[in-house]
């Protein structure tokens, strides 16, 4: 009995290895194709810039983002304050830079939660099939029956207006998208040979889901995550704009626009620059995501 | 002397792709006379479809381009014709039927709508008259219950019925030339025979010349008077059908004929032509068949062989018979 | 009447989803920190008053019973009472609905009127300058924060150029037309009042454009990609080989086939417009449901927020059903 199990676990391992080698090759090929695609490169550059700004903000921001200087309040863009100042005299450029930290952190958190939970839910639904699948997908349908912003707004309002709750609300709204996609992949993967082999050698459902199904969905999850990141940042900023999510004086882009709105007519720079950064960041994620999706399309790959 | 209907001379077609320039057709010379049925045979990828589409200028540009040559129809220059003139030729003086009946009809419009559209366009008649013509044509292709078929959607018809409807549609304006691009390849064998018979009868009755394209030698033998053999974008042999099958000149033709297993033969393996069809981005120099040819000569890898008349009306492009031109 | 059977069957599928929607909203509204009864009664109310209110609202009952009461109320059109103004939420929403409807409809019309031709042109002139421009425009559209776009539009057209008004549905001095549909554009035409019509039109231009921009981009993309895929099909080659003119090939044979995915996305977008309307109405002070709910959020008026959420999601679900049915008309292969 023992030798039998060892032999089968080795063949399983080999299978895993073989799968992996192929995946590594595919990954490198994807990278190569990406580097040739101009919009992918552009998107990548934008995102990397934003990440760098976010990471190094404490070092490169010209001013402390919460430093108040009433004598300089509402001054237009100048050499001293490249993006001008807000109603408390705070430097808008620095605040925008710190805002990158917040927005990107929200984005990553939401994707991690929604992606992780959603993928798990989807894998379980797809793999276990029939009743479980039906039930889970109906629940996902319920969540998808709401326009995303509306549901996020209702949840954030109920939970309380702060940044953490906004993250939870947006993540909740995004879960079905991941779940649906992973479910589709799971349905396809579960018919494959090595799953039957794994089951034949006594692997339990949990093990199979974690070690076989999920890794196979990895690349599509990444693509979806890139595409959704843009939408996530938009919804989070919208929530802050409405008054849920980040609260002033937090230098979050949406919150800044919400306050800056009052000053639009005479101090145009106040809401303009934060919004510009939202636009740029989301564009970056969207074109990278699009390029990635096109590249991974099996018809185009050769 | 029967007049020449279609005269293709020195036709070359190239496709400009990411991987390189595909030389799909190179110096193709072909004629179709009035009332004749010319067969064009060759493997998948040899350029038959490209040739067929070039006649009606259906090659998508980009990426394709007719880089050289002339196509004359009844003496008129097709390649230089205006778009307006081209539209009066298409479907009207020259018609084409395609390989896949499943996808050649628009799925969201009824069959009658599509057929009558062509008739009303070219024959300037009203709906009622067009309907009458279509029903008449459907009867001629032995379609059961033509009126019902007119109001059906393509998905409601079987493959054979769809192909018959296509034939009816394309012959409804009494063209002088019909180009049939593998019309029976996608059909079941029994349906194939039916459709072939209908095609043969109808074209003979209407006096339509046919350029019949296929990779199936059996089908070609059945209905064609003259046959042209294509390989890798070039015509390698042309002859009247009987002469081609009894006395093939080109090694490729001979290989093709040998590859067809006979019913009463005892075989363990099939006679294949060794090697694979070359890619057309960087085709072999000289005769494109030479890497696979058992009777290859030294010149074959350098000089392109021109057609040599080995017997009356039988031309072979092979150095074994001289270098021609 | 097989269509009717199909609709009923789809409705049957929808019922559990709708119930799920009410469940979700119910759960959310009970996640509220703090005491709803106290919030309704106000900070100054006595403990007794709060208790009375709690009992009359049924908040002391077990959860399942509360849910049933909640559902029962829904059936009778009772969406709760607004904390702000003590009116039934349903009445509030009904008041503000026409404004949102007008905005949403005009945005939709704009989307289709511009998106469809732009998508077709992009597909036909693929990879030429027009195509590149519209693709850039698409990316911007999908990435644009709606509220920022609104502000930029205001900056340009209202403040700098002075061409268009900046808020509301009509100039303050003008009286709204007599109420027939609640849509000022239509009502003023019905009244024959040209100047009111023009004024309403000027007011709706910017918000419509702002709201439609995102979906314009999406629709253009969908039309473009489905036209490209359709035009590569065999039956299009057949149509060309038959001598049909290029415009017939595009507008008759190609378009109908690419309408299917287009209609689907357009239909879904209508639902999402409600989300965008929230932001647009806020920026342009458009007195619709969106602005109402944002004001409610600032006030923490939960019944109003939940009522809005419920209504919008129901509408969204119904619109999707409509799209499904429409789909069947476009694709003859769908068997009901």
Image (cartoon, rainbow, N blue to C red):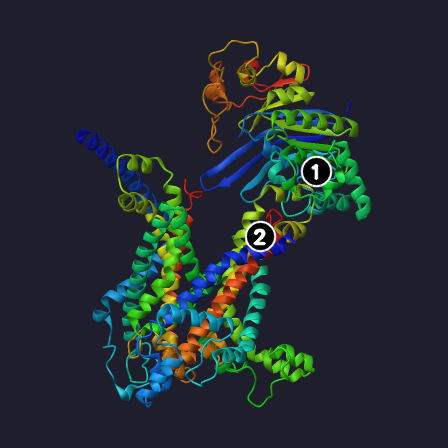
Q: Work out how far the residue at label 1 is from the one at label 2, CA to CA, in angstroms.
A: 36 Å
- Residue that carries the numbered disc 2 in the rendered image: C258
Secondary-structure class at tag 1: strand
Q: Is residue B152 left or right of residue C289?
A: right
Residue A254 visible here: no
Closer to the camera in the image, B313 or B262: B262
Q: Where does the N terminus of chain B fall, quadrant-wise?
A: top right
Please give the label number shown on residue B77: 1
Q: Is A271 rendered above or below residue C237?
A: below
Residue at 40% across, 56% down: A177
- The percent position of residue C290, horizontal first and vertical second, equals 47, 75
Closer to the camera in the image, A21 or A174: A174
Q: How many marks?
A: 2
Q: Callout 2: residue from which chain?
A: C
Q: Callout 1: residue from which chain?
A: B
Q: Where does the C terminus of chain B fall, quadrant-wise?
A: top right
Residue at 56% across, 51% down: C227
Q: Mark 1, residues whose alpha carbon is within 10 Å: few (<14), some, or many (≥20)?
A: few
- The percent position of residue C50, horizontal first and vertical second, equals 34, 85
Secondary-structure class at tag 2: helix
Please identify, in this view, whether the residue under mark 1 or under mark 2 is nearer the observer: 2
């Amino acid at each position: 009995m023992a030798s039998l199990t060892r032999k089968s676990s080795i063949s399983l391992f080999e299978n895993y290895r073989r799968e992996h080698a192929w995946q590594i090759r595919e990954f490198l090929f994807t990278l190569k194709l990406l580097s040739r695609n101009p919009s992918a490169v552009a998107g990548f550059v934008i995102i990397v810039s934003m990440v760098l700004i976010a990471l190094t903000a404490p070092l490169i921001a010209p001013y402390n983002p919460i430093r108040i200087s009433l004598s300089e309040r509402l001054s237009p863009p100048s050499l001293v304050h490249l993006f001008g100042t807000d109603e408390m005299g705070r430097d808008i450029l620095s605040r925008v830079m710190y805002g990158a930290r917040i927005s990107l952190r929200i984005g990553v958190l939401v994707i991690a939660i929604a992606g992780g939970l959603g993928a798990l839910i989807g894998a379980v639904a797809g793999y276990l099939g029939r009743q479980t699948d039906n039930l889970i997908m109906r629940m996902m349908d319920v969540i998808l029956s709401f326009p995303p912003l509306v549901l996020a707004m209702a949840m954030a309002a109920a939970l309380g207006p702060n940044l953490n709750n906004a993250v939870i609300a947006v993540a909740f709204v995004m879960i079905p998208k991941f779940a649906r996609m992973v479910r589709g992949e799971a349905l396809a993967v579960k018919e494959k040979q090595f799953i039957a082999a794994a089951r034949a050698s006594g692997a339990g459902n949990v093990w199979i889901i974690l070690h076989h199904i999920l890794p196979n969905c990895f690349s599509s999850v990444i693509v979806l995550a890139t595409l959704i990141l843009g939408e996530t940042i938009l919804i989070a900023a919208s929530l802050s704009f409405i008054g849920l999510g980040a609260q002033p004086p937090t230098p979050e882009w949406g919150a800044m626009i919400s306050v800056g709105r009052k000053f639009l007519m005479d101090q145009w720079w106040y809401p303009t620059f934060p919004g510009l950064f939202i636009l740029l960041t989301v564009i970056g994620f969207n074109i990278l995501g699009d390029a990635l999706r096109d590249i991974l399309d099996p018809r185009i790959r050769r | 002397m029967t007049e020449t209907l279609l005269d293709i001379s020195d036709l070359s077609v190239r496709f400009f792709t990411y991987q390189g320039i595909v030389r799909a057709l190179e110096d193709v010379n072909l004629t179709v006379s009035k009332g004749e049925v010319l067969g064009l045979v060759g493997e998948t990828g040899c350029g038959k479809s490209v040739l067929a589409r070039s006649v009606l200028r259906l090659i998508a540009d980009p990426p394709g381009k007719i880089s050289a040559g002339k196509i004359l129809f009844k003496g008129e220059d097709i390649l230089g014709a205006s778009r307006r003139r081209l539209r009066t030729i298409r479907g009207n003086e020259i018609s084409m039927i395609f390989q896949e009946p499943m996808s050649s009809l628009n799925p969201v419009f009824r069959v009658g709508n599509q057929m009558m559209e062509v008739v009303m366009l070219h024959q300037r008649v009203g709906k009622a008259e067009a309907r009458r013509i279509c029903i008449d044509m459907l009867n001629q292709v032995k379609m059961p219950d033509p009126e019902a078929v007119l109001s059906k959607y393509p998905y409601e018809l079987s493959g054979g019925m769809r192909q018959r409807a296509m034939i009816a549609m394309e012959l409804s304006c009494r063209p002088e030339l019909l180009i049939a691009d593998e019309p029976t390849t996608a059909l079941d064998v029994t349906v194939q025979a039916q459709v072939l018979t209908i095609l043969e009868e109808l074209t003979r009755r209407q006096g339509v010349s046919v350029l019949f394209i296929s990779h199936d030698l059996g089908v070609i033998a059945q209905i064609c008077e003259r046959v042209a053999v294509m390989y890798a974008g070039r015509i390698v042999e042309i002859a009247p059908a009987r002469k081609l099958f009894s006395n093939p000149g080109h090694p490729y033709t001979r290989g093709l004929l040998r590859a067809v297993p006979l019913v009463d033969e005892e075989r363990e393996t099939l006679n294949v032509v060794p090697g694979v069809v070359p890619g057309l981005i960087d085709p072999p120099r000289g005769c494109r068949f030479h890497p696979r040819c058992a009777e290859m000569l030294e010149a074959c890898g350098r000089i392109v062989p021109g057609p040599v008349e080995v017997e009356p009306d039988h031309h072979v492009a092979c150095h074994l018979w001289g270098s021609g031109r | 009447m097989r269509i009717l059977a199909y609709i009923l069957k789809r409705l049957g599928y929808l019922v559990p989803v709708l119930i799920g929607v009410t469940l979700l909203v119910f759960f959310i509204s009970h996640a509220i920190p703090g005491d709803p009864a106290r919030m309704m009664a106000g900070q100054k109310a006595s403990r007794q008053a709060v208790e009375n209110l709690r009992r009359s609202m049924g908040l002391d009952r077990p959860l399942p019973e509360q849910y049933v009461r909640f559902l029962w109320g829904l059936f009778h059109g009772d969406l709760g009472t607004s904390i702000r103004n003590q009116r039934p939420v349903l009445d509030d929403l009904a008041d503000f609905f026409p404004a949102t409807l007008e905005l949403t409809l005009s945005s939709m019309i704009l989307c289709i009127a511009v998106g469809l031709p732009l998508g077709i042109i992009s597909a036909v002139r693929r990879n030429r300058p027009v195509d590149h421009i519209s693709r850039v425009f698409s990316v911007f559209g999908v990435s644009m924060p709606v509220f920022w776009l609104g502000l930029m539009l205001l900056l340009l057209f209202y403040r700098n150029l002075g061409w268009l008004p900046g808020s509301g549905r009509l100039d303050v001095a003008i009286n709204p037309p007599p109420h027939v549909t609640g849509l000022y554009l239509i009502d003023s035409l019905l009244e024959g009042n040209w100047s009111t019509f023009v004024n309403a039109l000027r007011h709706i231009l910017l918000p419509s454009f702002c709201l439609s921009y995102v979906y314009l981009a999406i629709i253009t993309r969908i039309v473009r990609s489905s036209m490209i895929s359709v035009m590569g099909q065999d039956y299009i080659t057949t149509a060309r080989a038959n001598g049909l003119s290029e415009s017939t090939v595009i507008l008759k044979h190609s378009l109908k086939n690419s309408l299917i995915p287009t209609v689907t996305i357009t239909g879904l977008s209508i639902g999402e417009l409600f989300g965008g309307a929230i932001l647009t109405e806020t920026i342009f002070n458009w007195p619709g449901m969106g602005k109402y709910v944002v004001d409610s959020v600032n006030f923490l008026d939960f019944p109003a927020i939940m009522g809005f959420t419920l209504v919008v999601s129901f509408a969204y679900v119904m619109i999707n059903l409509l799209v499904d049915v429409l789909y069947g008309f476009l694709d003859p292969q769908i068997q009901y």
